[in-house]
Amino acid sequence: MQTRKVWFITGASTGFGRFMTELALEKGDSVAATLRRPEAITQLSDKYPPSQLLVLKLDVIKQDDINAAFEKAQAAFGRIDVVFNNAGYATVSEVESAQGHEDVVRDMFEVNFWGAAHVSQAAIRCFRDVNKPAGGLLLQNSSLAGLEGMPAVGFYSASKFAFEGLSEAIAGEIHPSWNIKVTLIEPGPFRTTANINVANIPQLVEYADTAATPGRIYMKQEVADDTRKAVVKIYDLTNMAEPPLHFPIGKPAVDVMKRKGESLIASAEAYASWSEGLELVE
């Protein structure tokens, strides 16, 4: 018999966060749904009792908000089993086009990297020090752009690359006795309401006929998979005893991961001999 879980979800107003909140509630789980504008999910608040759904105001760039949200969720439900670290947004811009718009890019990094890092820290402390018995699953919602730098979203890719590196380090740092699992969710293009969370920086005319233009079109989600179907797969992953560190979802993400892996292996094999004889001789 499946045990009901307690979720802590950031960015619960739109996209993956909203759909995961809805699915977890439908499954009978309890959810601490966090977002900057609680009124955005009034429909869910009206449908589910406070004993199952706790809606909390949270801006992930504010450490006090993060601390307060975790404390309230822990007080309400006693423990947190899954943290879906999902809040974030994209900046669409060629790297050069962003010059003069660094404030937009830095704001994105505050959310996508530093905000996600601080949520990760709070999740680890909760799983280890609050939960009895200790343990939990940290779901880090990354992106296909965290696997491969993409034209027109170089800075967004950089924020996700940083998030991926951080998450891999966390997975290596946690002690086995803490029973904490970490999974990077790496979605391809999915049709979500989160496309409102995209900051577009004007394109320099020099890039009109480069690969950056298709990249800008890609970010409009005109060709995309069904997010509701994806969150079902992610939910199934939370029932695994040993979830993977990397979880690509959507065929484009799977293809990118395969291509990246093959490319890295090919480079390692082609240039392995160049590292021979480099040992320091005293």
Image: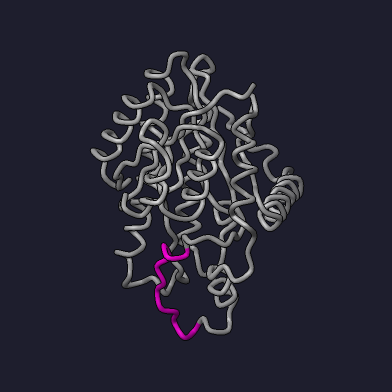
Quarter of the picture containing the N terminus is: top right
Quarter of the picture containing the C terminus is: top right
Compare residues 88 and 158 and report the one nearer the observer. 88
Query: Looking at the image, what colour scheme do you see?
Result: one colour
Does residue 151 lie above or below 272 as drawn? Answer: below
Among the 4 quarters of the image, the one containing residue 116:
top left
Q: Position of residue 95 (x, y in %)?
A: 45, 68
State which region is magenta: 195-206
Extreme residue in the left direction: 64
Q: Position of residue 213 (x, y in %)?
A: 56, 77
Does residue 257 lie above or below 237 as drawn? Answer: below
Q: Give the tally of numbered discs.
A: 0
Query: Residue at 56% across / 56% down in the picture?
Result: 145
Query: Residue at 60% across / 41% down in the picture?
Result: 234
Does residue 83 lie above or below 99 as drawn? Answer: above
Q: Position of residue 190 (x, y in %)?
A: 59, 59
Query: Residue at 46% across / 29% down in the picture?
Result: 6
Query: Residue at 38% across / 18% down in the picture?
Result: 129
Does residue 27 lie above or below 205 as drawn? Answer: above
Q: Position of residue 151 (x, y in %)?
A: 55, 68
Give yes or no for residue 62 being in the magenta stretch: no
Among the 4 quarters of the image, the one containing residue 123:
top left
Give yes or no for residue 203 being in the magenta stretch: yes
Compare residues 236 and 276 and report the one nearer the observer. 236
Compare residues 214 and 79 and report the one nearer the observer. 79
- Left or right relative to 271: residue 179: left
